[in-house]
Image: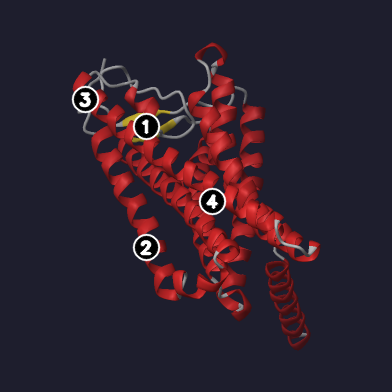
């Protein structure tokens, strides 16, 4: 078996051995990536250009869209390339970069989702202190903390994972480079335990954030249910439901994919679940947030109408 010093590339798990299905997967991933790029790009443009969307909630939504774009651009292009050209390889450096950026964006995204929960908690439970607790400087500090923690977490995991000697071949049972599948190739007991400790620490942090989110929403629902006017109660629920849906999608897909029973594990199921938690949330998040955010929908509609009118004027002047 090769060791880590002799490995120049890894073998990714293909979606299918049939050429027709490989091309089908390419077009499917192309459609998903375009939908994610369009949805998140519209949110980024609307929040950046519309003065009415310069609120803490929309500020964090902008950063969430950046992490969603990062997740899609990290895993999907290589999968599309392999499906189109019928290859299954990724270079050693490319695998390390893919693992680093995927861990980076996923860690930053969960941190941002936790911060966005705090934003909703303060807005509903402590509205008089909203401007103080979530001022522009505080928002900038929290966003910086989310990105910094994601970077340090990714750097630590990537450095430790790729410092392990690999002697179990170079075939990964996944369509992108992921820590658990690289650990299976390791022959270093101490290095493996070190990474398990790091992953266990991450699990504790994620669980702590999850408890904070649950506690915050318990307090939010208690306050909302005491609101006497149904219209205000409905508006308060509307500002929370998109975030709650995104958090539920993010946690449920990731948890089931990584903690499913070994008895139901198979290569095809593992591939489907990995797509579910790495590709589906970044694609659906813009749709989920746009459905309940009337201000965001109005800004996107206004922006698209302006672009369309400008294009018509350019065409008319050219004729």
Q: Is residue 233 left or right of residue 135?
A: right
Q: CA distance from mark 1 to mark 2?
A: 25 Å
Q: Residues within 10 Å of mark 4 (few under 14, many from 20)?
A: many
Seen from this angle, which residue lies furthest top? 263
Q: CA distance from mark 4 to mark 2?
A: 22 Å
The secondary structure type at the circle numbered 2 is helix
Residue drawn where x is 29% and y is 34% of the image: 198
For this rendering, which residue is in front, 162 or 14?
162
**Visual colour scheme:** secondary structure
Q: Which mark is residue 179?
A: 1
Residue drawn where x is 71% and y is 58% of the image: 238
Q: CA distance from mark 4 to mark 3?
A: 43 Å
Where is mark 4, residue-wise?
Answer: 216
Q: CA distance from mark 4 to mark 1?
A: 31 Å
The secondary structure type at the circle numbered 1 is helix
CB-based contact (under 8 Å), mark 2 and mark 3: no
Q: Residues within 10 Å of mark 1 (few under 14, many from 20)?
A: some
């Amino acid at each position: 078996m090769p060791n880590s010093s002799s490995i120049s590339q890894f073998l990714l798990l293909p979606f299918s051995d049939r050429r027709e299905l490989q091309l089908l997967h390419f077009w499917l991933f192309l459609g998903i990536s375009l939908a994610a790029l369009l949805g998140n790009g519209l949110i980024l443009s609307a929040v950046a250009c519309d003065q009415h969307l310069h609120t803490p909630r929309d500020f964090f939504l902008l950063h969430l869209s950046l992490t969603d774009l990062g997740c899609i651009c990290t895993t999907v292009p290589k999968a599309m390339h392999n499906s189109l050209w019928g290859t299954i390889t990724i270079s050693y450096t490319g695998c390390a970069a893919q693992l680093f950026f995927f861990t980076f964006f996923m860690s930053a995204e969960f941190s941002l989702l936790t911060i966005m929960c705090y934003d909703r908690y303060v807005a509903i439970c402590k509205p008089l202190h909203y401007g103080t607790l979530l001022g522009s400087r505080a928002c900038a500090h929290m966003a910086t903390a989310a990105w910094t923690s994601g970077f340090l977490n990714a750097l630590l995991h990537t450095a430790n994972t790729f410092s392990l000697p690999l002697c179990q071949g170079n075939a990964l049972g996944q369509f992108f480079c992921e820590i658990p599948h690289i650990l299976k190739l390791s022959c270093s007991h101490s290095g493996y335990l070190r990474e398990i400790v790091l992953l266990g620490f991450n699990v504790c942090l994620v669980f702590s954030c999850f408890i904070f989110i649950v506690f915050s929403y318990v307090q939010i629902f208690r306050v909302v249910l005491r609101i006497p006017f149904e219209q205000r109660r409905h508006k308060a629920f509307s500002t929370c439901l998109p975030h709650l849906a995104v958090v539920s999608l993010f946690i449920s897909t990731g948890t089931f994919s990584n903690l499913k029973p070994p008895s139901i594990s198979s290569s095809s199921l593992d591939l489907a679940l990995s797509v579910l938690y790495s590709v589906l949330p970044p694609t659906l998040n813009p749709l989920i947030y746009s459905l309940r955010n009337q201000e965001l929908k109005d800004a996107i509609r206004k922006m698209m109408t302006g672009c369309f009118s400008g294009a018509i004027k350019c065409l008319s002047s050219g004729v």
